[in-house]
Image: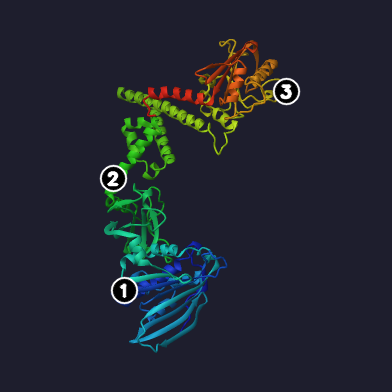
Amino acid sequence: MDLSIKVNLKQRVRNLNIKLTDLWFPLFEAVINSFQSIQERDKSNSGNITIKITRKNSTLPDDIGEIDTIEILDDGIGFNDKNFDAFRTSDTDNKIVIGGKGVGRLTWAKVFGSAVIDSNYYDDEKIKRRHFIFSENGFEDYQENILADQKAISGTHVKLRNMNSQYSANSAIELKEIATELMKHISVYLMNNEKIKVDLIELKTNEIINLNYTFFTEYIKKQEVKEIYIDDHRFFIRHVFSINKLAKGTNIAFFCAQNRVVNSVELDKYIELPETYLIDDKELYYSCYITSKYLDEDVSSERLAFNNFIYEKKEKSGMTGLNGFERINESVSYYLESYIKKIYEQKEDIIKEYISKEQPHFNYFYHHKSMREKLRSIPYRDVTDNNKLYEELRKIDSGFYIDTRKKVEQDEVTQEQIKEIVNAIDDTSKSSLAEYIVRRKLLIELLESKLGKTNEKYERESIMHNILFPMKESLDTIDYESHNLWLIDERLSFSYSGFSDIPLRKIMKTKEDTRPDLVFINSFTNSENKDKTTIDSMTIVEIKKPGRKNYSDGGPDNQLIKYIRTIKAAGEIYDYNERVYSLANNIAFTCYIIGDLTREMKEMLEDAKFTTADNGEKYTSYNPNNNAYFEFISFSKLVKDAKLRNKIFTKKINLVE
């Protein structure tokens, strides 16, 4: 018999495009061959396929081990002369009726060192045996003979041995994971051939997984086939609800050719779909299998892609071919219509609750029809993630503001348009105020969360400092929203200039390297004087570490008095642009000390002749020699007052607390 290969086999195998992550493809091909062999044997479509996994030896006791050999046994028609001749012919058309491309066995030689084939088949009513070894080098050890036992049945034993190391590196996974990969790829065969039993066996542990049972008990709960047309081509969509996922994602559409999965897409990227579906009181996952004679003929030789069929949005796709995007999405949407309606209702409730409780400044969206439509267009997958939902709401808000600006800038507007613009401006203004109040509320909560102990430790002083005003910055280098001086005194935000944790020598003529926490220039002798050269009011803020008990720098106002003396001795101050300002002779200082009112701090304040106010939560003092007013504010008092001020604004614009 002529055993020659009709092409350069080694080069053909090496040119085969099989990625390292596609190491299971030879197994898929062999199992599908077994299905087809059983189907070819008789019309009953009943038979057995057994898959045996052998792993490489490992010295590690818990090591799963890389795969060395995979055996596939079936009781199909076997390697008769017709099938063997087809096996020897590259790109054969022997199985073209059932979708064969004639390259499957080449993947065996690509991923494995060799394949040993033993097959029994009928020839002239006699049972014969055919044995050979196949690799990229061709055929070896060919044997053919009539079996002595004529009661033997037909079938094939394929032994894929010595998996190449670059592929086996990805093979150390549990048997259940191999079963999942295999079921995902041959799911169409499993659904259409329930009488063909498929067992997966781990020889090392004797673990057995029956794919039929696993597939139909752990995966498939309900299925239904619908027919659609794309252009003039007939397609079938098998809608499947499964107990477990057959892929990592949900709502997957599997595009199939020749009874196997070629590729897949996540439908919920394009259609509003729930993650699960409640059917008969069970949470199920949806997927669909798309088949067509067109796809059977269009699939590439490796069966990893289609040549002309595409699934793309028309405006995004630069490809030409048969585009199934709109028809498939339309058909799936119609089939799942009742579930999609529920998801729209659920989405609306989630958005409404989020806006009401977390972002009330977006409440004005509901006053405008166009805004309500934009809310409905937010993808469901984004409303379940607060960060993504917020981004979507910001986009809508920004778009509304831009549209309103365009209307304002029109040369001619009607009375109705004027009314619409005024209402829009009123809504956006309320929205901005509401957003600002919500930000304040979150900031207060952050500050409050830092007051207690974390892992038996109080927060560092720098944490509290940065919440109030970023260290190493000035009022000239950051914008209004980047600091929170309002927590101390709203008026500080409007100071002419201010410095945070900056050495005094950098803002005045002094050698002192001390750094007040915060220093502000409040006002000038003559506010009408545009030159503003003489400063008559300043504020200094000193922040103490929460929970601090030990003080080595004397009284609570000692450090502040040292700062005042240094400033007065220098006689002038530079601003951010190094412009020089002199100090008024009787310059007034307002000094805040912010810290925890511990027992030690309370005793120090009383010893320094501070008087109490606000039920003992605030202490004040006046130093006439330096024209300086001192005020100690506890962190708890700071938070309490901030909450009260914010609450007034909240009530004014009817925000939900």
Regarding mark 1 in the picture, which secondary structure is present there?
loop
Name the front one of labels 3 and 2: 3
- Looking at marks 2 and 1 on the same chain, the residue that comes earlier in the sequence is marked by 1
Report the amino acid beneath label 1.
Answer: Ser
* Residue 100 in view: no
Q: Is residue 382 above or below residue 6?
A: above
* Spot occupied by residue 380 in the image (x, y as percentages of width and height): 36, 44
Left or right of residue 588: residue 107 = left
Left or right of residue 576: residue 646 = left
- The quarter in which the C terminus is drawn is top left
Tell me the CA gap for discs 1 and 3.
96 Å
Foreground residue, 90 or 390? 390
Q: Residue at x 31, y 51 (%)?
A: 277
In the picture of the structure, the residue carrying the numbered disc 2 is 341
- Looking at marks 3 and 2 on the same chain, the residue that comes earlier in the sequence is marked by 2
In the picture of the structure, the residue carrying the numbered disc 3 is 511
* Spot occupied by residue 555 in the image (x, y as percentages of width and height): 64, 20
Report the amino acid beneath label 2.
Answer: Lys
In the picture of the structure, the residue carrying the numbered disc 1 is 46
Left or right of residue 445: residue 590 = right
Foreground residue, 75 or 6? 75
User: Residues at badges 1 and 3 in contact (C-beta under 8 Å)?
Assistant: no
- Give the quarter of the image for residue 650: top left
- The quarter in which the N terminus is drawn is bottom left
* Spot occupied by residue 46 in the image (x, y as percentages of width and height): 31, 74
Tell me the CA gap for discs 2 and 1.
42 Å
- Looking at marks 1 and 3 on the same chain, the residue that comes earlier in the sequence is marked by 1
Q: Is residue 466 above or below residue 33?
A: above
